[in-house]
Amino acid sequence: MQNVEQDLRLEAALALLERQSLEAVKVIDTRGEVIGVLTRQEVESAAELKERLALSNQRGSSTGKDATEVGANPASDLLAQVPTQRLLDALHDGVYITDGRGVTVAINQAYERITGLKRSDVLGHHMQELVRRGYISKSVSLEVIRDGKPVTLVQSLRDGRKILVSGLPMLAHDGTLSHVVTSVRDITELLRAKHAQEQLRQLHSLHDTYSVSSGTDEQSLELVTSDATADCFALAERVAATDVKVLIQGETGTGKTLLARYLHEHSTRAEGVFLELNCAALPEGLLEAELFGYAPGAFTGANARGKQGLLDVANGGTLFLDEIGDLPLSLQAKLLKVVEEQRFMPVGGTELRRTNVRLLTASHHDLAARVKEGRFREDFYYRLSVVPITLPPLRERRSEVIPLLQHYLRHFCQRHALVRRLDPEVLELLGGHAWPGNIRELINLVERLVVTTTNEVITSDVLPAEYLAAHANSGWDDSMILGAITAPEDGSPERTLKEHTEALERRLIEQALEKHRTTRAAAASLGINQSTLVKKMQKFTHTP
Ligand SMILES: Nc1ncnc2c1ncn2[C@@H]1O[C@H](COP(=O)(O)OP(=O)(O)OP(=O)(O)O)[C@@H](O)[C@H]1O
């Protein structure tokens, strides 16, 4: 059965090599693990040997056994002229042959190359002795002799390399064990490649979870700045080339992450990775494992192969730690060590690892206040905030609101293949909104308006209630309206009746909007139709 499988694999390998003009094929076991690589030359010579065997078998006997019989194989007629040692030395894999008692009778050159052992070291020696001397960690031949069946295992050599060893029993005519033939393949490279593959897999999953992936929508957008923010970006550009620590502060959605990425992209690390971790998003244990990684089997449930931490993955690049104010004190101490020494210890590890990462941090908390409250280490705070940059909230950079609205309108129209315009009245209303969620809130609103509106022009009647009460939020209050209907005391000309009436109308409409939240309900409560109310509001926004 085993031979049939091998034959089928050989044919499949040959077909694959022919069909796809490959130079080598991988051999995979039933669990999908790669156990070796066969070159075209190896597959072809095996196929040729198989053909010869088949020819000879037509003329001769067949063993009908799992193991190979020595001396009864008619193929030996054809190979008889070739000296056995030359045949063995022609093989790329190492070969080790013992007699039925475990005494070494032959090895080939490939075995010497792979293991570094010399023929003179092993010939005539018993396998037990070689294990005792520490030449090899475990003997396959002895296991084959003990169990009487093929054995495959991975051995470690003295220099730490790993070899895959497969031993096969060879039987004499009388069924007794004649020899054990062992093939040896250096799988150090294979294991390294597998390890690299695992690291890559981890990197991809980290990238999906934490990184601000490149080519995002935001990245393709231009920055909208005003006097209030241009200084922040100019400062970021100035310090980008250095490795100084920058602490970015500002309310949520003000562009802290964008500024961090801007810094990375203007730095000499721009080719390296930019990873972002939100320190408020994970419990302490997980946060530690993500940042520092862990050694194989560090804790129950850990990946048996261990895991690289972000400090390793971001080596040569930038690690942006958002919400650093929420980092537990114990991890602040560990990270301080990284900042000071550029070294860290993975969870459960025994060796310090070096890393060359630029740390950028951000927080919506007032970190200085957190230091005073004893919730943030003072030494860590000073280390991180060599250059502090504070992004103002959107309500303090009003001149950006309309450019941002137009900017994201264009963006979402393009993304959803729609044509939409913002009615000037909407621009006015939104221009006066307080934007507690800052730019993120603005972006979400614009996308919502673009995809939910059926008309080309987006009018105020589709605005959610909180945006209609914009004037109330933006500093308009009753006193200003009352001021409009009260005779001025500063000697300026008296208002006309029309102006008084308009001011009163405006006040009533504002109050109705505040109370009823939508233009439809406010209009109904005032006994006018919705479009009249909207027109009047539009007129008011143009009236100082
Ligand atoms: N100046 C700007 N011009 C254009 N878009 C901007 C600007 N600043 C920020 N944005 C966009 O606003 C959104 C929110 O920005 P960002 O995620 O950087 O904010 P944040 O302060 O990091 O928020 P949080 O504190 O919640 O993490 C992002 O989509 C970003 O691309």
Image (tube, rainbow, N blue to C red):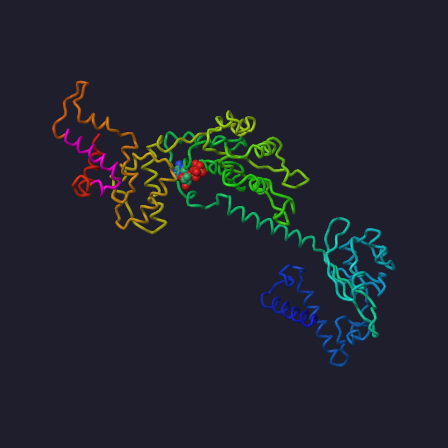
Count of residue discs: 0
Q: Is residue 476 left or right of residue 394?
A: left
Q: Which quadrant does the C terminus fall into? A: top left
Residue 258 appears in the picture as rendered: no
User: Relative to 542, is 51 above or below?
Assistant: below
Where does ligand 1 appear, by image quarter? top left
Q: Which quadrant does the N terminus fall into? A: bottom right
Q: Position of residue 159 (x, y in %)?
A: 76, 48
Q: Position of residue 307 (x, y in %)?
A: 61, 46
Q: Residue at left 33%, top 45%?
A: 410
Q: Nearer the viewer, residue 332 or 407?
A: 332
Given the current orientation, which residue lies at the most extreme right position? 124
Q: Position of residue 251 (x, y in %)?
A: 42, 33
Given the current orientation, which residue lies at the most extreme bottom position? 59
The answer to if 124 sits in the magenta stretch is no
Judged by its main secondary structure, the magenta piece is helix
Quarter of the image where one finds residue 506: top left
User: Relative to 76, is 297 above or below?
Assistant: above
Q: Is residue 282 left or right of residue 9?
A: left
User: Relative to 303, is 405 above or below?
Assistant: above
User: In the rendered structure, which segment of residues is drawn in magenta?
Assistant: 499-522
The answer to if 511 sits in the magenta stretch is yes
Given the current orientation, which residue lies at the most extreme left position? 497
Q: Position of residue 32 (x, y in %)?
A: 62, 61
